[in-house]
Image (cartoon, helix red, strand yellow):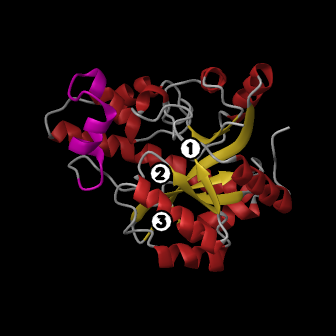
Amino acid sequence: MRIDLHTHSNVSDGTDTPTRLVLEAAEADLDVIALTDHDTFGGLVEAQEAGRRHGVRVLTGIEMSADRDGRSVHVLGYGCDVRDPGLLAELTRMREARRQRVPQMCARLRDLGIAITMDDVLMQARGAVSLGRPHVADVLVAAGVVGSRTEAFEQFLAEGRPAYVPRYATELGRAIDLLHAARGVAVLAHPWGRQSRSVLPAPYIEELVHLHGLDGIEVDHQDHDSHTRSLLFEMGARLGLVRTGSSDYHGAGKVDHELGCNLTRPTAYRELLARIRGRGGAVPR
């Protein structure tokens, strides 16, 4: 069984429709995917309907924006009740915060001599429910200012760069609690990728397990080298965490993250489903 538990559609910052994402998953010989768009369940129904047609199980998922001491981190939620009022209210608040900072980023880019407007971003986003920096990056690519989203972030949009604007995100412990209240399970996304190891050190992850019941950590991810994967796998075993693997697929929006480039072990997937069932959450049929 081939399982990829972290993918994005154009409902957030991927480039494939939910249906196209499922078709690509089927072509990649995946049996199970999770659609984990940023701060929205908006593409889930379409993806699950496509999954039933094309023989791919689609696990209910989300990648929730979170904050630790002013630093951005992400937590994946699986099996949540997509109608839970508490979770939905927080996701709405975060999507609005995403949207509100876009005009500020455009203004900062204009101050740098780069002509870009909110209308340009909305046109590039093509109706995405969850608006974000990648859509600003896409405008910069389309205008020939940079060659890729990665370059746009490195030059302008990443934290500390000239067009970066902070925004509201849920405190990480509270985000885990909200996912649990919605009958889902919580898995830290790429916890030691890029700069995040200093934000999520091992003692703090252990604290999240004891104080908030953190369920898992994403181990096999393109942002983790082999040594980091080994450390996370061993730590996860010691803490009783589900250890997942995934592509973090964004279609054309992120290079070197092809569907299935990292996979979740079937035993880990079964453990994840058992935890979801234990909370009364939703599992694929």
Q: Amino acid at mark 2?
A: Ala
Q: CA distance from mark 2 to mark 1?
A: 27 Å
Q: CA distance from mark 3 to mark 2?
A: 35 Å
Up/down of 96 relative to 13, above or below: below
Front tag of 3 and 2? 3
Upstream in the sequence, badge 1 or badge 3? 3
> What element does badge 2 sit on?
helix
Q: Amino acid at mark 3?
A: Leu
The magenta span reads 141-160
Horizontally, is 124 left or right of 85 in the view? left
Task: Say few, some or many: other residues with alpha carbon within 10 Å of mark 1 (under 14 / 14 to 19 / 20 or more).
Answer: many
Upstream in the sequence, badge 2 or badge 1? 2
- Tag on residue 97? 2
> What element does badge 3 sit on?
helix
- Tag on residue 43? none
Residue pictured at 64% horizontal, 68% vertical:
214
Given residues 102 and 192, the one toward you in this image is 192
Q: Say which residue label 3 marks.
A: 231
Report if residue 1 lies within the magenta region: no
Q: Amino acid at mark 1?
A: Ser
Q: Position of residue 28 (x, y in %)?
A: 60, 25
- Tag on residue 246? 1
